[in-house]
Amino acid sequence: MILPLLVAILLVAAVFAWISGRWSSAWPRWISVFALAIDLLVVTIGWFAGSGDASNGGRWIQQFRWPWIPQLGIEVHLAADALSLILVALTLVVGLMATASAAGQRDRVGLLHFHLLLTLAGIVGIFLAMDLLLLYLCWEVNLVPMFFLIALWGHEDRFYASIKFFLFTQLSGLLMLLATLALYFAHGQQTGTYTFNYEALLNTSLSPGQAMLLLLGFMASFAVKLPVVPLHTWLPDAHTEAPTAGSVVLAGLLLKTGAYGMIRFAIPLFYTAAIAITPVMIVLSVVGILYGALLALGQSDLKRLVAYTSISHMGFVLLGIFTWNQLALQGVLLEIVCHAFSTGGLFVLAGMLQERLRTRDIGRMGGLWKVAPRMGGMATVLALASLGLPGLGNFLAEILILLGAYQRNPLWAAAATLGFIVATVYSLWIIQRVFHGQARPGHQIADVTKREFGILAASVGLLIWLGLYPSPLTRAAAPALERVQTTANTDSIRPRPAGGQNTPSTCLPLVPVTSLEGQP
Amino acid sequence: MTSTDFILLLPFAILSVTAIVVLLAAAFCRHHTVIVVLTVMGIVAALLTLPWLVRLAPAQVTALLTVDRYAVGWMAILGTITLGVTLLAWDYWRLRNERAEEFYVLLVLALLGAMILVAANHFASFFLGLEILSVGLYALIAYDRTRRFALEAGLKYLVLAATSSSFLLFGMALLYAHVGRMDFVHVARALSLDSDPRILAITGLALLTVGIGFKLAIVPFHLWTPDIYQGAPVPVTAFVATASKVASFAVFLRLFRQLHPESGSPLLVLIAVVAVLSMFVGNLLALRQQNVKRLLAYSSISQLGYLLVAVLAGGQWADLAGFYFLAAYTVTTLAAFGIVALLSPEDREADRIADYRGLAWRRPWLAAVLTISMLSLAGIPFTAGFVGKLYLLGAGTADGLWWMVLSLVVSSTIGLYYYLRVVFVLFAATETVGEPIPSTPRRRAWPSQLTIAVAGSLIVWLGIYPTPLITFFQRTILQLGVR
């Protein structure tokens, strides 16, 4: 019962936040914070109280099933293993961050928090859904509040950005729906039971051609969300035009649903087909890393710049997923979490600057360190995290991914490493052009408030923690991550990934993760 | 004729009597409310006989009508739609200085035609129903005779509907010449038996499809749609968009399911081409519309294109898909036109998109319902439209109609743009251009508000918990296509 409660709390809070917005602008904020905090508590309780469900070989920590549309075999089937719970917890923490950053909003606060909480509820739903149709529902339905967040509270070009975002995700989502339906009928014709249940569908045997088409259907959706490079063009617009809270949720969470979808659904459901597309995905990921980083260099709009760095970082995530080894997958999880905080933090920062300076143009900033030293300090740490400074989480994540990739394909791993160099340039460039150099007249801005300092400090603290001691996270998620590459029935028949024979890729111990801590 | 036959004909009889009573009442007592109450009572009485009919169904009443669960199910939907339209019309005409009493006579007659159509199992009753419906509609569309657009629309509909009827008649004549029978069952059986390339039969069926295609407003028989939608008074537009299409689709599906055309038959190809064209043409032409009624017209063209996927696909999912999608479309369209009707001031209709600018801040509930309607038309989850679209995609996927399904996916994504544009306008900052529509709620507008509220809640309910309606439809379609 804990899992539906997680979503329900957010939904109820959303309605209350909306209603209370009529009387006061403080109420919605506190209701959101309160609901998210309660939800975090519930997640923690669920984590410790949940025992492995015996029927699933202890796979799920928590599970909930309720027949919803029995005629079609659609259930409300929520289940969580460590991976899901970590991501749900991440959702809630980033949600808190977004709520805190939205405190600067003055207009229609109730409605803002309504949409924010709905988006979060949808994302929690994505991370918990184990019924493919339910997954699709959550996937689609959280577009609507996100669309409103961009359309109502966004910046100048919000019409274009919000609709582009919606159309991209909708088209790719419908392809996923088609693939889901095809899988549903294929499974039904084989077994006679028509169901959207994830675990049942794992046992569907498909011809290679079918499997490839269905995988592409699912990947279309996940690749747009992640985004994988040729499908990324919605991202810079949406991230730039969204209000701060929206950008934080977009970058911190919505992109991650793409990665989660690949790890949880696309790969286990179509294992052999996924191996077949590995070379393409690796090339696309490296292209993404370099392309995103290079385009970030050329941006003058601060939010747009950060948006492009997201594309680059998500390239690492894709690379890690398609490297087929545990080390890289742990790197992916770390990158998912760390990127949420480093990029989320940078978006919060960009939001603060825009609130104060009424511009996002880097060319019109400069010399802000003198007036806002605390902001500058925090920004520096976040930028350093983004460029991959050892000791901060992102470094560990990306190095793990590169280690995994190197075992698989040294050449492409080396190419991806170039991304680090460009990242160094754009990160330091942000700091230099925004905070150092000639101060512009009239830029007497206030330094960070306590609230803002709290948001930034929390992100920085989490990044440092994950950079120094990530093993609680990786160890907890390890069993779930291992399952990705050892799906229930394909164990015996699955071919090993090409090139993986001579490296014990899946057998690397978890110890190196922690032993890397001390190295500079 | 046995006494059972009379019971089975009760809804038709009640509606006919209602039409006459309303006409006579209007002659003696020109009181709007009285007339509306009489109309509503008549329709409700007809609806109340339906459970009785279900117990006797299926039954053939004379050679012309089949009263089975399929027909009764559609009759229930048609009656409910007309109730909604009556309420909208009551509110609409009350605001305008127009003798509106005869309006309801025509409305009841149109409903009667639609009900005959869904029960038709014979070319004669098919044509009879269609003509009663059409003749009612000619007058309804042009009812507001002081408006130039209404007259134009009425005339246009008259000419085009007459043309399409002649196509239909010619098709029927060809089939009759070929088969020598007029009832669907025998025509279908005869057509399935002969193995020749039978040019006469195919031409006949194609002409029949043209006739129905006109009523359904699918490309290339769609040209009348935007003008009639724009010109007709909003309640009539709502009726044309819902009841008229529901009835035509129901009879089409009944005929089609009995024909059982084998795959690769020219008829299937014709319908597939028409469906894909409708999806794309409808959605593309809607993109730049500045008039809400025209936008909804083009939207309906594409929606009916989607619906044809259900006709092409076979199997249980397909029939359910047709039902559910059409029900969802109907409810949604009714809600949307209800809002247009409610917001229309006395001297014109609120049909420009600019009229809706910032509506969310002035009339939040109306804006919410309109938003939900738009999302439902776009097929976003947790609205009725989504479940309908899910069924259509499922039916297409199960049957391997990949081209149809992909066209549906791509064209509906194109369509999403204009639905979102409306939503965006609803929530835009208020800077009205031209004379604004009244922003304060009108007093005594409860009939429209009731219709909108019911339709709006149905959209959400059918989207979140579709199980009861699916069960209802499953019982209904049991009798479709039985030999």
Image: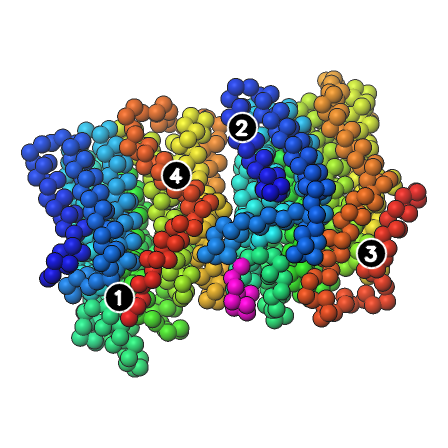
Task: Report the residue marked by disc 2.
Answer: A16
* Image position, residue B18 (x, y; %): 14, 44
- Residue B212 magenta-highlighted: no
Give the left or right position of residue A37, taking residue A416 as reference: left
* Secondary structure beneath label 2: helix
Q: Please tell me whether residue A320 is drawn above or below residue B400 in the rendered image.
A: above
Q: Nearer the viewer, mark 3 or mark 4?
A: 4
Q: Quarter holding the N terminus of chain B?
A: bottom left
Q: Which chain carries label 4?
A: B
Q: How far apart are marks 4 and 2 (CA)?
A: 21 Å
Q: Do labels 3 and 2 share a chain?
A: yes
Give the left or right position of residue B124, taking residue A67 as reference: left
Front position in the image: B256 or B477: B477
Q: Which chain carries label 2?
A: A
* Image position, residue A133 (x, y; %): 54, 53
Crowd class of label 3 (few under 14; some 14 to 19; many from 20; radius 10 Å): many
Task: Report the residue marked by disc 4.
Answer: B456
Front position in the image: B269 or B328: B328
Residue with the most extreme left position: B28
Q: Distance between the residues labelled 3 and 1?
A: 66 Å
Q: Nearer the viewer, mark 3 or mark 1?
A: 3
Task: Report the residue marked by disc 1.
Answer: B207
What amino acid is at disc 1?
A: Leu
Task: Specify start and end residues of the magenta stretch as a single range.
Answer: A187-195
Q: Distance between the residues labelled 3 and 2?
A: 47 Å
Task: Report the residue marked by disc 3.
Answer: A404
State which quadrant residue A500 falls in.
bottom right
**What residue appears at the point 55 percent right and 57 percent down from the top-left corner?**
A196
* Image position, residue B483 (x, y; %): 28, 71
Q: Do labels 1 and 2 share a chain?
A: no
Q: Distance between the residues labelled 1 and 2?
A: 58 Å
